[in-house]
Image (cartoon, rainbow, N blue to C red):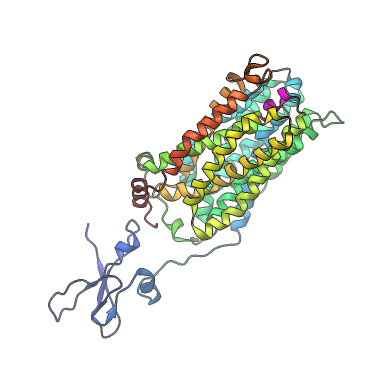
Amino acid sequence: MSTSYQPLGPAGCSPALVPTRSSDVPMSDRLNLYDTNQSSSRSPSPQPGGEYDNYRYNNSSQLESKGLVNEPEYRLYKRRWFGLAELTLLNFAVGWGYAAPGVVSSTATKWYGISFQELNNLSIISALVFLIPAPFTIWTLNKYGPKMCIIIACVLTVIGNWVIFAGAATKNFPVNIAGTVIHSLASPFIMASPTRYSRQWFGDKGRTLATALPSLAYPLGSGVGSLSGPYMVKPVGPLDYSGQALIIALVFTAAAIPAPFLPKAPPTPPSNVSTMQSQLTLVENLKSLFTNPVFYLQFIGFSIFAGAIDTVISVTNQALNPYKYPQTDAGYAIAILIFVGVAVACLLSPILDRTGKHLTALKIIVLMIATGYTVLPWMPGTGSIAAFYVVYAWIGASCLSVEPCVLELRADWTHPVSPEFSSVIGWCGAKATGAIFIVLVGNVLVIKEEGEAGQPLGSLFYGLIFIAVACWVCVPLSLMNGFWIFKRQARSQFATK
């Protein structure tokens, strides 16, 4: 491939030849300078930072300051907050709807006349249905951007939640399942959009926070649902189990109204990252992603850790019920887990934006996650709900704070693959893992006999130990991020690092 040159240089000096820009060549390789003094014999090429013929050849930023390299104009628009607020609100509503059945599982089983295991099927179905539209989500994000995904998600969630309400109002569990399926089809469109949206609208120093806000709104919605659920289903006036479904449907309907009015894309890019979106085809994106060892390290860890916290949120009431804790305690526990986690993540995200220490934070946090899950199996049997709350706060602070860090780090280290590919595939892994964990923890590994392992009938002691073991298996994989072989692969695939 030939490279064209244009003469540049200050008056009185030999003209330097600077290669023309190419989007697929790193800046450091594009700015090699050569002496072309036609009046003298050919001389050695100057080195960056060295002096040659009374002219100092330096790095790209110094050339740009002299006006020798024209950079595109980058600009941030206030309207970006409108789209971010809508995306955050939708993730909040989806999280609320996901947590609604599990936190009041005792009431839900009586309402529909079903068992805990049958109710767990809602979470399993929700996780597995997530996988169905995943390829279409990738295609939509890649071709039309986040706005189209948001509109599709709004339509599906509004329809799904009104069907869920119809099932709750008539005490018809199959109708509830149908609504859950429709609702779950929308989840990948919403949950995979934050990374792409933040890269499209936000600059380098605000991108992690912009990814964190909508990503953390999902667990925040689960926390609000967990805290309010036990009070919303009390048989006082219209607020029975169907009353909760009605309120959630109304919230979704209200959240969907602004979607058609969102701006599609900024007039000018906010940073060089947004101008370097992948030009690879679908097959090339997938090939590049699946041949990158860094992706596997982060995919496995994210799938296990995210699947574990989804499982814990889903089975909290089932875990406490054999120990005679009231249903409201489960709601408080989930709320503490989520609110503490969101608070820590919101504090950590801007720090990571400014310091760039994503990898260091990841390695510390995964150890905290595994430690929290190691202690958890023994907490329900202590008789102290306060101890259970403390462990849940620890798990929330570690699990939720690592989520935006991993999403941003994975998007960077899998470049030039478009971020929606790694995001959607990562969430698919998390949902599939969560479905498997819920089956094992809530159905298979349940204590079948009173007094087995010193636990009451129906205890999830074995299941919670299984989650702890799975998390510790992932710790070495997460700690391998940044080692020489993986660092080399990551740098070769991310030209701006």
Answer whether residue 483 is visible to the viewer in this image.
yes
On screen, 6 above or below 452?
A: below
Q: Is residue 52 left or right of residue 162?
A: left
Which residue is at the front of the view, 114 or 393?
Answer: 393
Q: Is residue 52 left or right of residue 320?
A: left
Q: Residue 119 magenta-drawn?
A: no
Residue pushed farthest bottom? 12
- Whole-percent x and y of residue 205? 52, 60
Q: Main secondary structure of the magenta part?
A: helix
Which residue is at the front of the view, 142 or 290?
Answer: 290
Q: Is residue 352 left or right of residue 71?
A: right
Answer whether residue 132 is visible to the viewer in this image.
no
**Where the N terminus falls, by quadrant?**
bottom left
- Whole-percent x and y of residue 40? 14, 80
Residue at 52% from the left image edge and 42% from the top image edge: 366
On screen, 188 above or below 41?
A: above
Q: Quadrant of residue 318?
A: top right
Residue at 41% from the left image edge and 49% from the top image edge: 413
Please state the extent of the stretch shown in magenta in the rendering.
Answer: 316-323
Count of numbered circles on the image: 0
- Whole-percent x and y of residue 18? 28, 70
Q: Residue 321 magenta-drawn?
A: yes
On screen, 202 above or below 489?
A: below
Which residue is at the front of the view, 348 or 55?
Answer: 348
**Where the C terminus falls, by quadrant?**
bottom left
Residue pushed farthest right? 237
- Whole-percent x and y of residue 97? 67, 35
Residue at 30% from the left image edge and 62% from the top image edge: 29
Residue at 19% from the left image edge and 75% from the top image edge: 36
Q: Is residue 459 left or right of residue 468?
A: right
